Amino acid sequence: MWNKQRFICLGLFLMFLVSFLTEGYAQESKKFTTGAFVNVNRLDTDLQRGVSTKMDVQRVLGAPKGMGGAIVPVYHLHRELWYYEDIEMKDMKKVEGVFKVNMRQQVLFITFDKGVYDGYFWFTNVSEDKAR
Amino acid sequence: MVRTSRCRKSAMNGGEMMLKVGRRLFRNHIIIGFVMGLLTLSGCATQSATMVQQPFESDRYATVQLTPCVNRTDYKGAHDLVTEATRTFTNRVRDSGLFEIAPDAKIVLTCDIERFEEGSAVKRWAMEGGATQAQVVVMVWQKPDEKLLGTFRAEASVKYGGIYTIGADHYIFGAAFNDIVQQLKTWVKGEEPGKSAGSVK
């Protein structure tokens, strides 16, 4: 004869088993984001062009998502770059075989001249009148 | 360099914890407890990204100082992210035996928490979403000239799983910092990051 304790044990075990077997129903969220910019409002107050170091930039903005270099031909400049991104995709849906996504994209480049903060360049995919 | 892998020791911590609970619940059913422990090992994965600026120099980088982790997220839940992440980060670096930790060391390891989502095991089981995620980045600097030596980023997540993934929000930082330590080990050994199976260049 099965006693009460054994029934409880079996019940709990079945619960774990069912949770394991049905995990396929879990799906990822339909919103994808890289995370928002951090402290960009402190760019002009906390960082000084020609003075601030890379470590100062890291303290204010956090770690960059990418690093590299760029050439600005008009000014004949070569600068080291740190790259930050704030990209969010949501409301993804398939309409008549076409994927439609509402995407907000912002990119911030921090430029360094000989390892010292030299300024920034900001890009947004929002139209000019709505960009802030 | 980006690499994807399953969680290692951190999942074991969660697994061991669940195993203990399982054993207490089912004293005469150790196998059931063992199965429960095994189940907690699945569902957790990490993703790494390493950017090495300078090769490791063993004679100069033996001692490091750790700065408290900075919370860059907009998380407003019950977890004290700074305390939890800093404690985990310090323990993992100390336990790794890679460096000696000293407050005045010329090598500085900064730590940023870039993402934290508490998630929910019930949501993961019953409906969409509910992923538990943590993303951290450690940058290694050389003082006094503040030269950047390397950037090590890790994202740990439990996106799938049933109710056996309860408590993932408590061991997710452990999984992320384990991955960071693995990246640091690779850097210290002078090996190419992401050389292991499953790496993505």
Image (cartoon, rainbow, N blue to C red):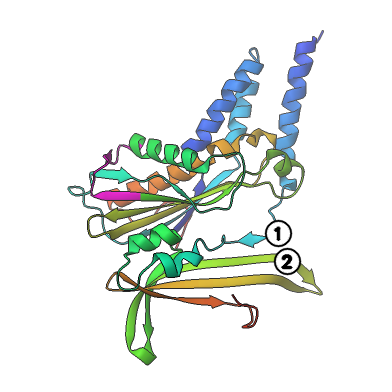
From the image, which quarter does the C terminus of chain A lie in? bottom right
Quadrant housing residue B51: bottom left
How far from the left and from the top, in percent, is residue A92? 73, 66
> Which residue occupies 80% across, 72% down?
A95
> Closer to the camera, A37 or B32?
A37
Residue that protrudes farthest toward the bottom in the picture: A74
Q: Which residue is mark 1?
A: A30
Would residue A64 be counted in the magenta stretch? no
How far from the left and from the top, in percent, is residue A56? 35, 61
Picture disc at residue B48: none
Q: Residues within 10 Å of mark 1 (few under 14, many from 20)?
A: few
**Circle 2 chain:** A
Disc 1 residue type (three-letter): Lys
Total numbered circles = 2
Q: Earlier in the sequence, mark 2 or mark 1?
A: 1
Whether residue A82 is situated above or below residue A30 in the rendered picture: below
Q: Residues within 10 Å of mark 2 (few under 14, many from 20)?
A: some
| Mark 2–mark 1 CB contact (< 8 Å) | yes
> Which residue occupies 38% across, 71% down?
A68
**Circle 1 chain:** A
Q: Which residue is mark 2?
A: A92
**Alpha carbon separation for disc pair 2 and 1:** 7 Å
Q: SS for tag 2?
A: strand
